[in-house]
Amino acid sequence: MMAKIGMMSFAHMHAYSYAASVKQLPDATLAAIWDDNPKRGREMARKFGAPFISNVKKFLAADVDAVIICSENVKHRPMVELAAAAGKWILCEKPLATTVKDGEAMVATCKKAGVGLGTAFPCRYAPTLIEVKSQIAAGKFGEIYAASCTNNGSYPGGWFSEPQLSGGGATMDHTVHVVDLLRWMTGKEFTRVYCENGTLIHKKLKTDDVGVVHLEMEGGLMVSHIASWNRSRSFPTWGDVTLELIGEKGVISVDAFNQKVNVYCDKVMRAEWVCWSGNMDLGLVKDFVAAVDARREPPITGVDGLKAVEVTVAAYEAAKRRKPVPLTT
Amino acid sequence: MRVGIIGCGGMGYHHARMATNCGLRVAACGDTVRSKAEALAQEYSAEPVSDSLALVRRNDVDIVAVCTPTPNHAPYVVAAAEAGKHIFCEKPFGRTVEQCREAIAAARKAKVKLFVAHVLRYFQEFEAIKAQIDAGKVGKVGFVKSYRGGVYPRGEANWFRDYAQSGGVTLDCIIHDFDWLRYVFGDAERVFCQALQRSEPDVLDYSLVTFRMKSGVIAHVIGTWAHPSGFRVKVEVCGDGGMLQFDSADAPISSMMREQAGGTPGMIIPSSPVPVSPYQLEWQDFVGWLEGKHPPRVKPEDGLKAVRMALGALESAKTGRPVKL
């Protein structure tokens, strides 16, 4: 079967990689592109060789099985609702939503409409992180007691620091990946959140750009996580995902994208780390396409997305109230 | 000037050598374990003493170096001050803030000089980091992260394993980073901490500490005594004009031994030699102060404030809430 995939918005840069992944898959086709920014939509249509449909109703009425939504964060909910009403399978960029209420509504809407809703957590497809998960699952480290993690990045610019579009800054942008990875690796839920955050690096932003999140998981597993846009423009790469896990039988650390070649190019005059490891976005999109074909729930669900939203929202609340916020599991 | 060492464990040996390198003479070595006092005393042709309270009163001792487990620092500092001796005290300054206050008051009253050994301020890599920050290379700093630790340390009668005495990795190890953060970025406003402090089935400690500095800077410190082997230090400083990183694992020398009969094989040992040890620089600074040449880089109040940061962190770990400092 050939899954016909439509793209809804290229506001989030991950859309480029997802669209390119769809193009690479033999059992999927990039059927149509819609974007609420018609200029960007037309440009992407030319780039990816797919028709641009400017009217969202016409786009959803077109012969499209599933959509990948990469809009600004706050627009995820209305777009998911439109797509679900049209019976489309949905892969939504992270964070799934910027409020728990929105996330819950999205999950409920898709369930009611009988469509699959997936959250784009491509890190679950990074070979390094798959290896760590399998070693933990094999019991090599025994019980995991503690973890210290990071998801640092450079400032992405644009709408990411417009709170009415992003719902928050670095804490909103860079908490969910690691929260999802920890749930995926340990099978445990989060019970408590504390956070210190602020606008510390890029003073003119209207959002936070550094968040230090302290978390507790079921059984008392203690976690600290740094969600940031603290990488300078001269830093050799965009950022990182790292985890150090302290277990009963040993310790394992992973720097997920540290499969790199160091490049020193005089034309660039900035050291570059070129990552050569597998394309995790391709793995994500491939599994989504398989779920669309089988008309089953995508492997990383809307509920997975919602769980990460709950932690992120609680982090902002904790930072504001300056005290830990409990989570119900 | 002649030095009396109190506490003849690892740090006692170390400071005896550093003092000697500074041209001082080790005159007496005190330890409640007589054999330990004798072993160190023999190396320096010094007098072994079982009662360290008697050591501080000896006429052949001008400087007392306190290298005992943490809870005994303050009592010996007070006794040494009352005996009119200058004091070199290992970190952490005290087990409680009250102990630090008593030690400071005793030294002030006796008009003796009291130095708290926050040696990180003399480490070449940390001085280089500070110099880059001071030169504006990273712009205005907003975020700092540091990481320190490795294997759980051994001590006389495994005293580190008794959290009531040692305070674990939070009080004993990353207090280095706490002091350095104050040194470079000023006082802390509040702290949040999660500390593992396990005793069963294995003794492991891991500490995740976040300070909000008065300047607004967020500082995250990770301390580990949970690793099976090794020791590692990492630092990252991020500002509006750039960032910097240091990692001790990225070392100029690394060696790896072939397995010998009965030996331990395989582990890569990194090393980064310096012409003058930071511990030596620390003693030079202390001696220079005693000779009236300059003020010391570390003042007793710095030692107290670092203890307050660490105890605030431990209180937060216990209550699960941020603690105002």
Image: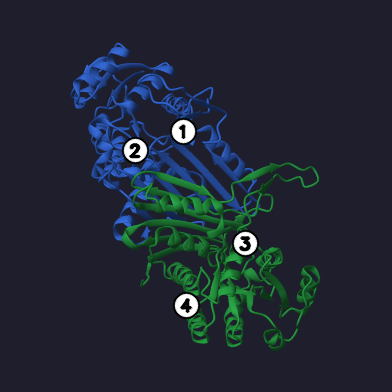
- Specify the colour of chain A: green
Q: Which quadrant holds residue B60?
A: top left
Q: Which one is closest to the eye, mark 1 or mark 3?
A: 3
Same subunit, tags 4 and 3? yes
Q: Earlier in the sequence, mark 4 or mark 3?
A: 4
Q: Chain of mark 2?
A: B
In the image, residue A56 above or below residue A248: below
Whether pointer 4 and pointer 3 mark residues with C-beta atoms closer than 8 Å, the reply is: no
Q: Chain of mark 1?
A: B
Closest to the observer, B169 or A205: B169
Q: Which residue is mark 3?
A: A281
Q: Which one is closest to the eye, mark 4 or mark 1?
A: 4
Label 3: few (<14), some (14–19) or many (≥20) C-alpha neighbours in 10 Å: many
Q: Which quadrant holds residue A37?
A: bottom right
Question: Looking at the rendered structure, which numbered label has been put on residue B152?
Answer: 2
Q: Amino acid at mark 4?
A: Val
